[in-house]
Amino acid sequence: MKFTQLLRSAAVVAVMALSAAAAQAEDTIKVGLIAAFSGPFADYGKMMEAGIKTYMKEHGDKVGGKRVELIIRDTTGPSPEIAKRLAQELVTRDKVDFLAGFGLTPEALAVAPVAEQSKTPMIVMNAATSVVTAKSSYIARVSMTLPQVSYPMADWALKNNIKKVVTIVADYGPGIDAEGAFKNTFVKGGGQVLESIRSPLRNPEFAPFVQRIKDAKPEAVFVFVPAGEQGIAFMKSYRERGLAEAGIKVIATGDLTDDHVLAAMGDATLGVITSFHYSAAHDSPENKAFIKRFAEVNPAAGRPNFMAVAAYDGIGAIYEVAKKLNGKIEGDKAMAILKGMKINSPRGPIMIDPDTRDVVQTVYIRKVEKVNGEPYNVEFDKFANVKDPK
Ligand code: PHB
């Protein structure tokens, strides 16, 4: 072969390789899932991944004529800097069509400017500080907000003759939101907050705080801690320091009695009242089907929690967008479809508010009870169509 021929055929091969790569890129819808998969919040990413896999198993991995590709990135968090770097890489190098995940508020806030600049739709599957959705017009939230689930708890407490409380919340965005929303409704309704305690986000030591709660002699303690191990630690101190015997009830957002760790908390949680958007015990055909499919697809994952459900709904929203856009994802068009979208979630019907891009949903009041020998958050009252009270 002559040199020029050789060059030409090499060029042909190169062009072929390039167009194959381009064709492959065009044939996929890429979803970058950013969350903690290691460290103290590792369950957040794992629950989200398991929820997404459940949906993809049910609906197949093709939509709008394309294959959906999930690209998973571990923040090891809470690590806003790592989350931001991962998002930048996903957008510029992997050219993802969607950013998704975000268990922790600081990580969602750090990524918001990346979504905004690149016009990449960002589906928040947990991070629940009210302000998150205001940080970019490319964010839609399918999970909850702390004010949304906290003020119904205050309402319920007042109606049930609880008039004096101490609040304790994790000292960062969602905790401060929970404290504010609870207090606002509670005090307006004639209740009294004797003391407001904030515990550190990293490695809190609850015993001294729990003693302070006991000494203040409230009728109840209102609690927000991020889902998982902190709930176990708080309830352990509550029991050990004899608050139940002192007649101090626990009222909380459902993060405290997270379905995924509830069984590990043992009998310490029995009788705890919480307000939340999802319970694994939610009695509906959609939830029963979800629970069954989740266990089939993720046999080692344990009981699904609210993050698994938000991720299941979030990928459902992505499929809906992809279907409507025939697989050609553009940020502005995607957001127009997400605004006002209704989803028949395992938690009950939800909607993405067209003005705020935040989730509108039913907030349930639940009590921890044993069902067939296992503790569950059993729903017994509800507030319909609750918005984040922005
Ligand atoms: C948050 O960081 O926004 C967050 C984390 C865990 C929760 C709720 C909110 O359970």
Image (cartoon, rainbow, N blue to C red):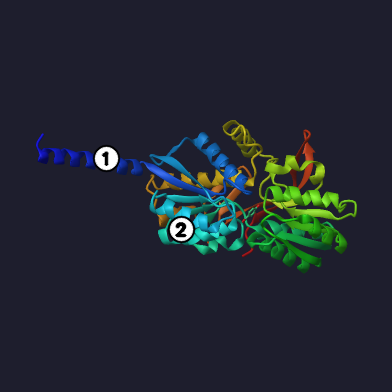
Give the distance between the C-alpha atoms of the residues marked 1 and 2, in whole angstroms: 30 Å
Q: Is residue 92 left or right of 130 when viewed as pictured?
A: left
| Quadrant in the picture for residue 78 | bottom right
Q: Which of the two labelled residues, at mark 1 and mark 2, occupies the earlier sequence position?
A: 1
| Residue position for label 2 | 115
User: Dot 2 surroundings within 10 Å: few (below 14), some, or many (20 or more)?
Assistant: many
Q: Secondary structure at mark 2?
A: helix
Is residue 189 in view from this perspective?
no
Tell me which residue sits at (78%, 49%) in the image: 235
Q: Position of residue 297 (x, y in %)?
A: 57, 33
* SS for callout 1: helix
Nearest to the eye among marks 1 and 2: give it. Answer: 1
Of 232 and 295, nearer the camera is 232
Amino acid type of the residue tagged 2 in the rendering: Ala
* Tag 1 near tag 2, CB within 8 Å: no
Quadrant of the image for the N terminus?
top left
Pick the residue in front: 207 or 300. 207
Is 281 located above or below residue 158 in the figure? above
> Is residue 211 toward the left or the right of residue 97 in the image?
right
Q: Label 1: which residue?
A: 17
Relative horizontal placement of residue 314, taking residue 322 as reference (left or right) = right
Q: Amino acid at mark 1?
A: Ala
Residue under the image location 68 percent in, 62 percent down:
171
